Amino acid sequence: MEFGTLFHCLKDTKQVGCKWVFKTKLNCNGNVERYKARLVAKGFNQKEGIDYETFSPVSRKDSLRIILALVAQYDLELHQMDVKTAFLNGDLEEEVYMCQPEGFIIEGQENMVCKLKKSIYGLKQASRQWYLKFDEIITKFGFKENIAADPCIYLKISGSKFIFLVCTRPDISHAVGMLGRFQSNPGLAHWKAAKKVLRYLKGTRNNMLTYRKSTHPQMVGFSDSDFGGCHDSRHCTLGYVYLLCGGILVAEFVSEFKALSFVDKPLTLYCDNQAAIFFSKHDRISKGAKHMDLKYLSLKQDVKREKFVIEHIGTELMVADIFTKALPPKTFKKHAESMGLEDSS
């Protein structure tokens, strides 16, 4: 097998070294069967991403066990095979130059190098090139690769792109949160839901956040939670929003806005749960409420110190509802407008 041809070595030509590896092969009785000499490349000089690509899939042990189980179940015949010197069959995609091997240096052409045509042992990409060759051959025999659904497209939509849009379009926060729960294993229903969000954004592309000057600017907050909204875990979804000058604020900025001179009043927090308001203002507690963690009960101290003023508001006016559940179109639009989202067209 011809593995390369000689080329004149240019000054900036990168080349890998090589060496001979000798091995004595014994038979089952321990006697010498033959002597092997293998030429290997010193691939440790190659740089990944520049000189080669290494990705080469291998079969999982789980796949092998499944095959063995199917053989036992259906009384099949199992055959295995081995390709001798498999790595030598791969065709190189990159240009690889190697020093002339010891003992085969051509007199008068010592400065020339070998341009490899085939993979040899020691090259970093040898495994990958063999896989590509093997895949090409078995495909010709009618084998087909089992291609799973690519989640990358769903991840691109439901991931960074939506998270970026939430900065200026808080009305899609709940939908983005729901789509994000299925990033590891999205299905057709999730893909359709993601496209529905995109269609909504396209139809409301002129919506923008607006803020208006107020004679008496005061920051107000809205807090809401659903009741076991997640059908899988029965976990609750919490939503909260702070408004100032008719527009939404980012929750992390609350402490900074509190420091402004014109915010001289306690922060008003609206809640539509009468029980939560009662426990925040009174020291009485029932046996059924002892499961609440102490850190949540510390809110009582803040109320007593007049850091917060908690007031009740009707569910139909609860702006934070938009972050906890899917709402009817009319209610959804009203809450979005309450956060400062208006059509600029």
Image (cartoon, helix red, strand yellow):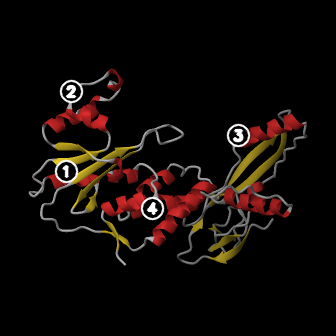
Q: What's the distance in space between the residues labelled 3 and 2, CA to CA?
A: 58 Å
Marks 4 and 1 close (CB-CB < 8 Å): no
Q: Earlier in the sequence, mark 4 or mark 3?
A: 3
Q: What's the distance in space between the residues labelled 3 and 1, CA to CA?
A: 53 Å
4 vs 3, front mark: 4
Residue shown at 84% from the left, 47% from the top:
81
1 vs 2, front mark: 2
Task: Answer whether residue 46 is visible to the viewer in this image.
Answer: no
Q: Earlier in the sequence, mark 4 or mark 1?
A: 4
Q: What's the distance in space between the residues labelled 4 and 2, CA to CA?
A: 43 Å
**Left or right of 101, for residue 13:** left
Among the 4 quarters of the image, the one containing residue 345: bottom left
3 vs 1, front mark: 1
- Circle 2 crowding by C-alpha within 10 Å: few under 14, some 14–19, many from 20: few
**Residue 283 shows which numbered tag?**
2
Q: Earlier in the sequence, mark 3 or mark 1?
A: 3
Q: Which residue is mark 1?
A: 255
State the SS at label 3: helix
Residue shown at 23% from the left, 44% from the top:
311
Q: What's the distance in space between the residues labelled 1 and 2, CA to CA?
A: 27 Å
- Circle 3 crowding by C-alpha within 10 Å: few under 14, some 14–19, many from 20: few
Q: Position of residue 267 (x, y in %)?
A: 18, 48
Residue shown at 15% from the left, 52% from the top:
258
Q: Which residue is mark 3?
A: 62
Q: Earlier in the sequence, mark 1 or mark 2?
A: 1
**Residue 162 shows which numbered tag?**
4
Residue type at tag 2? Asp
